[in-house]
Every structure is written in C-alpha cells, then in structure tokens.
Image (cartoon, rainbow, N blue to C red):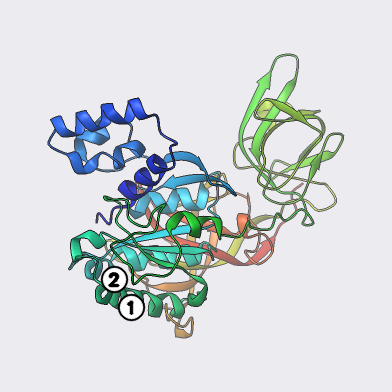
Amino acid sequence: MDHGKSTTIGHLIYLLGQFDERKFKELEEEAKALGKESFKYAWILDRLKEERERGLTIDLAFLKFETRKYFFTIIDAPGHRDFVKNMITGASQADAAILVVSAKTGEFEAGMSPLGQTREHVFLARTMGIDQLIVLINKMDTVDWDQTRYEEIKAQLSKLLRMLGYKVNRIPFIPVSGWTGDNLVKKSDKMPWYKGPTLLEALDMLEEPPRPIDKPLRIPIQDVYSISGAGTVPVGRVETGVLKVGDTVVFMPANKKGEVKSIETHHVRIPEAKPGDNIGFNVKGISRTEIRRGDVAGHPNNPPTVVNEFVGRVIILYHPTAIGEGYTPVMHVHTATVATRFAELISKLDPRTGAKLEDHPKFLKQGDVAIVRFKPLKPVVVEKYSDFPQLGRFAIRDSGRTIAAGTVIEIKPIQVS
C-alpha cells in the first residue's frame, strides 16, 4: 500500500534545505529518464539503486534532520513486517510516530479494512507504547483539496484511535500533499479551511520523552569488541539509569562482573552515560568471550531480571494457519534473540476493549489478541513492560516474517549461579 510516506518525508527534508541540491538534481534527472518522476522525493530516502528500480522501500533508512527545536532521527519503515521488527528491537525506539494515510478514494478504505495496514500500524504503535502521534492525511491533491473528504477520514481515524486509548484531541490531523509539498513546511493556500499546524509546526509541538535516570541501570548489549590496549568494550544503548566511570556492572544472564574504566559516545569520552546514549564502555575483569549481544548490563545491587518463562500479551499479526501450544518460533526482545515456545494459551481478548473472550483457546490466528505463557529455550533478560517498557516489548518471528508483537505482563525470575 503506497500512502506516500517516503515521498512526504523526502519532500520535507528537501524543503528544510537538508539534502544536497546537486544530488537532488541528479535524482530528478534519473527519475525522469526512467519515467518515474513521481518517485523523486521518495528517492531522497531510497538511495540504493536496486530500490529505485523497484519503486519500493526495502531497507530501513535512518535519516537525521533538524527543526528549530529538535534533532529528529527518522525510521522510514518499509511495509509493516520489517517495521515491526525494527520498531521493537531497533536500537532507536521510536518516541513518536507519523501515521500517513492516503485521502485517495479506495486507498484510505483499503488501509482501514480489517486486514488493512493503517489499522495494523495503529495497533502496533499502541502495543509498542508510542503515545505521541501526528496524522497526515496525504494526497489531498488527488481529491481537489476537498474539506469534506478530510473530515470524513479524520472522523473514521479518530474513532479507531479513541478505541485504542489515544487522546484524540491532542493529535493533529494535517491535510497535506507529499508530492506538491502543501502544508509540510508552509501553510497551504489551497486549503484555507484548515486552521491547524503544518507538519513542521506539529513536529516541534511533540514533547521530549522523559529520560528514566531514576530507574535501575539497564544497557542491552549490541556488540562486544576486544580493543588492543583497552580490553573488553561492550557497545549498547542506555535504556534506563545512569552509568558512571568506576561503577561495577554485572552482565546477565552471563552473570559476569567487571569495573567500568571508561565510557565513550561517538568517539568522545564522557564521565557518565544517561538514557538514550549509545555508548561503548571499557570493562575490566571480563574477557570478550564471556559476554555477548543480547546480554544486559546493570548494577549488582539491582541486576537485570533473568527468566525462563513469562506471561505476555500479544497481537498475532500474521500466520498462514493457526498457532497452538508448543509452537516454537524466535523471540526478539531488546537486543536478544532466543527460540521461545508458546507454552500455554491462557486466554483470548477482545482486541478493541481488552475484555476476556475465551479461556484456554485451542489455537490463535491472525488478528487475535491473547495472553500467553512463553518459555524461552534458554535464560534471557526480560522485564515487566510496566517497570521497564524498553525491555518489556518483544516481537515473535518465524522464517523471516513477524508473527506477533507483544508486551511482558508477568515474569518469573530465576537465580543465575
């Protein structure tokens, strides 16, 4: 479904003057030569040649741009399957989401159908704990800038968002055209009836998420290096708490302790690291082979929680048939991946209200929301979503597809010797 995400964001970056004009001219000529002029702004995001030829966003594009108030990193997600995986397990958890829907007749309706991606993306954003949303009603140029169409779409989306617990009066619904640039940076003269913010203004109205420095330290490890002269250097993003030079840290489930000798972020030495910082830190007393990606660092007085079973609330996003007890796909949680069994299907819930529909269902299928007892096949760090959201959301994947997304509601800690 092409609702015009890449074109819209590419055009925004262009209008903000944050893409090299000479490179843009090259893109434009190439697009014309291929008879694909309508892709030129999307190509700002889709740099890779093979993607251009297919006219699809394949890979995640990480892009930074600046507004008066903030630095943004955009995660442009191709279709929903990879979007889910990256949204849940990516190093940069999204703080806010821009939902792009097409005003074009038929396209909006398809996205809102029971299997539509608009509906699914909204569910996912909610499941993943994203509570700041900007809605772009795109392709207004295809409906003659019609206010009635805008109001109709806004009403339908509001209903869905309200049902999921969003505060709709705090969400801007902005009529735009990613192609012509209307209402991205400057107020459009084609829609004088619209009195709200432009996309740029709405971005600056977002609130910076709180940095949980008062919570216990949690650093999921992305990689571990051995650097000559320095020794063992784990790399990861601080999710909660504060790490200081001189601290003793413990890595779980490896249960290895060491002393922090130095901390670096983007090649700059810093005395302490806070939530949101991507860091490398040199640890004394641990060899490189003793810890690995997926381990989580914390302080010994409040170490990361290791489990070999937990209860989660999941939404089944895709499955060709049905899932029964015993199904063992792969779970992605923070930076860890571990084969995990659906040990017990506890109950099935109404996706809209969360009310219980059925105890101990025989199976689960696409679209179902359920409470499930999971058994990872080896010990892994997970935390309750209510305590540490960053370590309490997970994705379930099987043969390259995202099967389910969920949050951890109960844990059974184990002692690691």
- Circle count: 2
Tell me the residue that label 1 is attached to: 156
In-image side of 40 versus 295 (left or right) = left
Q: Is residue 66 above or below residue 1?
A: above
Q: CA distance from mark 1 to mark 2?
A: 9 Å
Residue 157 lies, in percent from the top left, at 36, 74
Position of residue 290 measured from the top left corner of the image (x, y, whole percent): 69, 31
For disc 2, the marked residue is 112
Q: Position of residue 415 (x, y in %)?
A: 75, 54
| Residue drawn where x is 48% and y is 70% of the image | 171
Is 95 above or below relative to 399?
below
> Could you tell me which quadrant the N terminus lies in?
bottom left
Tag 1 near tag 2, CB within 8 Å: yes
Q: Amino acid at mark 1?
A: Gln
Q: Return the residue nearer the eye: 294 or 166.
A: 166
Q: Residues within 10 Å of mark 2 (few under 14, many from 20)?
A: some
